């Protein structure tokens, strides 16, 4: 082919597409938010996960109330959420200036936080937050009360339906917001109390003295981040929690009998779940200070192994990497001020070093923990090196892992990084079905070979000696901690039978033993697949128009209740198939189960879950004790005819 012909082919448009002045559109603020909500609140969701959009728009309202408290106004915030999803938030701060109630709730880039003298170290500075709540709500009402006067404005999908004049009132100063997330955007949403309570508790931990009352339940903290650590730790601390604070900084540090490291970070009361410059500086400063205190050549990984810590700082005009504010990007404590790294480093060097000199018993326990970690690391050093080499030679991406293109720790992934997931499957047929139908952009598949090893009570050496775990660790990229995690969701996909349940337990045991932070940070899930397929036996093959992703005459049922409802709909024509394993589900059917509406159960750890005791009971060698527990708690039901 000639160079001239090649050039002409390149320059030739693939197809004629109209492009005229009429194609250029300007969206108003509310329409833009409703069309592109992800730009403002991250993902949408239905409330099943803590980072779903309904919690973000609640938080946008709460942040304003918290900022008032931080400035010294209003010691209580009332939050009420009804069964049908109506939210009410009442603070007792200064109240929005009455003449500006409309502006702050419906005009973009409008707020008081541009002026640092009013809100020096606020969470939101862009004048966007509460407008997003307004735009994404079916209805939104905001009232401000100041010095005996009030003002109320009512919206429906961000359009004003009532703009009442200023009135006299006996209400205490403050702001009242009432809204209902729009079901057209958050389809089938429902607030989960556990996620709301966790959000509110964090506010009280970070604002000692603040009281939040949620649906009548009082939340209050006297000890700040110490209470936060106690709330989240599932193993006892090895020594009393170290609590250090000064102007604009508070930290807590301890160790527990667990592998890995567990850190919580906050900026201006915002939970930065993905860390940022402040967390990186904190981890570096803590490691360096402890190393210098003991005057030993410890590796940072040994110092931080088993460490549980939290840091909260206040930054003037913080810069986050996204509107959802989960990662801090700021380099300085304030414009043209000292760097965050130096501020944190100087504080940790001074206060932590002093604490360890004064509290000798704590220093001795910490030293033993570090030395034990060092001893174990050196014991497996040879195995580790060989295992890394073996992982490279085993052609991970061909034999065990069918990778995806977008990863959680890859900046190039953009907004889709949060969608990245890896399915951990067992068996060639199940792996094959998922692999054929997955989204290659965001969904990876890792194939297990049979049942994995029970790792309870074993040392970390087993991670490297066992090929399955060694390759899985390499695929997840978590050997050095979660900073390099390649997938946001780690999804265990096993059969819904006894063997499948056993594999789930073995995998969760492995993660709890060696990577507990993966679970605590909310990255581990169980894939729910249907137990039954109920369809019209007159149409053995799926046909007809699709409705919500499922043929009109075919129903996939995850419970007996769903099965019975499907049978009622189809009557005598019902044909019931009981799926015994994932391998029986065709690739086309799998499309329904791992798509946008896939059902996932998040693996969670609660405060009352003592990992050591829990694993010892369920996965230890106390066979007789476990057998008696099963007998005492066994529920026997009559066998039911599946055709009824």
Image (tube, grey):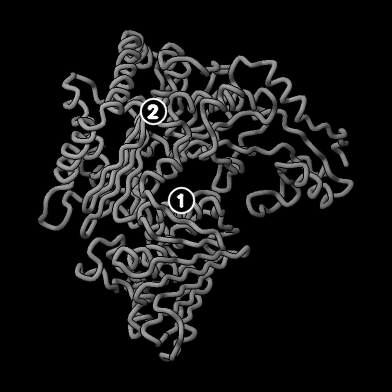
Q: What element carries label 2?
A: loop
Indicate which disc residue 135 carries: none
Crowd class of label 2 (few under 14; some 14 to 19; many from 20; radius 10 Å): some
Query: For mark 1, what is the residue?
Result: 51
Crowd class of label 1 (few under 14; some 14 to 19; many from 20; radius 10 Å): some
Q: Nearer the viewer, residue 407 or 156?
A: 156
Query: For mark 2, what is the residue?
Result: 238
Q: Could you tell me residue 456's position as x and y percent?
A: 52, 18
Q: Residue placed at 32% from the left, 54% from the top?
A: 322
In the picture, measured across the screen, residue 91 lies left or right of residue 386, that is: right
Q: Residue placed at 23% from the left, 35% from the top?
A: 355
- Ranked by sequence position, the earlier of labels 2 and 1 is 1
Evaluate whether residue 440 shows in this view: no
Q: Could you tell me residue 372's position as x and y percent?
A: 33, 16
In the picture, measured across the screen, residue 117 lies left or right of residue 477, that is: left
Location of the C terminus (image quadrant) = top right
Q: In this view, does 494 lie above or below 380?
A: below
Q: In this view, does 337 lie above or below 537?
A: below
Location of the N terminus (image quadrant) = top left
Q: Nearer the viewer, residue 525 or 358?
A: 358
Q: What element carries label 1?
A: loop
Q: Nearer the viewer, residue 270 or 485?
A: 270
C-alpha span from label 2 to label 1: 32 Å
């Amino acid at each position: 082919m000639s160079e001239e012909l090649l050039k002409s082919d390149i320059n030739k448009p693939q197809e004629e597409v109209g492009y005229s002045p009429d194609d250029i559109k300007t969206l108003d603020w509310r329409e833009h938010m409703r069309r592109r909500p992800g730009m403002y609140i991250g993902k949408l969701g239905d409330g099943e996960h803590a980072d779903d959009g309904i919690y973000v728009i609640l938080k946008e309202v709460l942040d304003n109330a918290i900022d008032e408290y931080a400035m010294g106004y209003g010691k209580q915030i009332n939050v009420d959420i009804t069964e049908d999803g109506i939210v009410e938030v009442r603070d007792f701060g200064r109240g929005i200036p009455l003449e500006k109630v409309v502006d702050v709730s419906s005009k973009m880039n409008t707020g008081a936080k541009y002026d640092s003298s009013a809100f020096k170290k606020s969470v939101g500075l862009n004048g966007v937050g509460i407008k997003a709540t307004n735009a994404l709500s079916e209805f939104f009402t905001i009232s401000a009360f100041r010095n005996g006067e009030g003002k109320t404005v009512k919206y429906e999908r961000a359009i004003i339906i009532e703009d009442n004049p200023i009135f006299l009132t006996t209400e205490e100063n403050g702001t009242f917001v009432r809204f209902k997330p729009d079901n057209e955007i958050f389809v089938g949403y429902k607030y989960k109390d556990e996620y709301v309570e966790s959000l509110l508790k964090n506010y009280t931990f970070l604002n000692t003295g603040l009281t939040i009352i949620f649906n009548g339940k009082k939340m209050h903290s006297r000890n700040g981040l110490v209470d936060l650590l106690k709330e989240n730790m599932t193993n006892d601390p090895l020594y009393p929690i170290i609590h250090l604070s000064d102007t604009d900084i508070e930290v807590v540090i301890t160790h527990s009998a667990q592998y890995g490291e567990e850190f919580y970070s906050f900026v201006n009361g915002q939970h930065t779940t993905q860390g940022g410059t402040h967390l990186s500086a904190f981890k570096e400063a803590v490691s360096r200070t402890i190393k210098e205190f003991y005057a030993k050549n410890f590796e940072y990984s040994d110092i931080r192994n088993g460490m549980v810590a939290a840091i909260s700082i206040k930054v003037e005009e913080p810069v986050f990497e996204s509107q959802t504010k989960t990662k801090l990007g700021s380099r300085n404590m304030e414009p043209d001020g000292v760097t965050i790294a130096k501020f944190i480093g100087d504080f940790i060097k001074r206060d932590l070093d002093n604490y360890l000199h004064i509290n000798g018993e704590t220093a001795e326990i910490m030293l033993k923990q570090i030395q034990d970690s060092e001893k174990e690391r050196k014991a497996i050093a040879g195995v580790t090196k060989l295992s890394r080499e073996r992982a490279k030679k085993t052609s991970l991406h061909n034999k065990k892992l069918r990778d995806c293109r977008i990863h959680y720790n890859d900046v190039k992934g953009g907004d889709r990084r949060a969608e990245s997931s890896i399915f951990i499957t067992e068996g060639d047929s199940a792996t094959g079905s998922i692999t054929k139908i997955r989204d290659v952009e965001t969904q990876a598949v890792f194939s297990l070979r049979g049942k994995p090893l029970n790792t309870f009570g074993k040392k970390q050496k087993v991670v490297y000696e066992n090929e399955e775990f060694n390759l899985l660790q390499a695929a997840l990229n978590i050997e050095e901690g979660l900073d390099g995690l390649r997938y946001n969701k780690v999804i265990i996909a096993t059969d819904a039978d006894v063997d499948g349940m056993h594999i789930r337990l073995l995998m969760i045991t492995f993660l709890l033993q060696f990577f507990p932070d993966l679970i605590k940070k909310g990255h581990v899930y169980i894939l729910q697949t249907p137990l039954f397929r109920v369809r019209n036996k007159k149409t053995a093959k799926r046909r007809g128009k699709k409705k919500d992703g499922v043929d009109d005459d075919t129903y996939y049922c995850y419970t007996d209740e769903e099965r019975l409802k499907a049978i009622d709909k189809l009557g005598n024509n019902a044909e019931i198939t009981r799926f015994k394993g994932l391998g029986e589900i065709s690739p086309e059917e799998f499309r329904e189960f791992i798509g946008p509406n896939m059902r996932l159960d998040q693996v969670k750890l609660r405060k009352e879950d003592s990992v050591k005791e829990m694993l010892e009971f369920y996965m230890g060698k106390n066979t007789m004790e476990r057998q008696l527990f099963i007998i005492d708690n066994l529920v026997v039901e009559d066998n039911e005819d599946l055709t009824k």
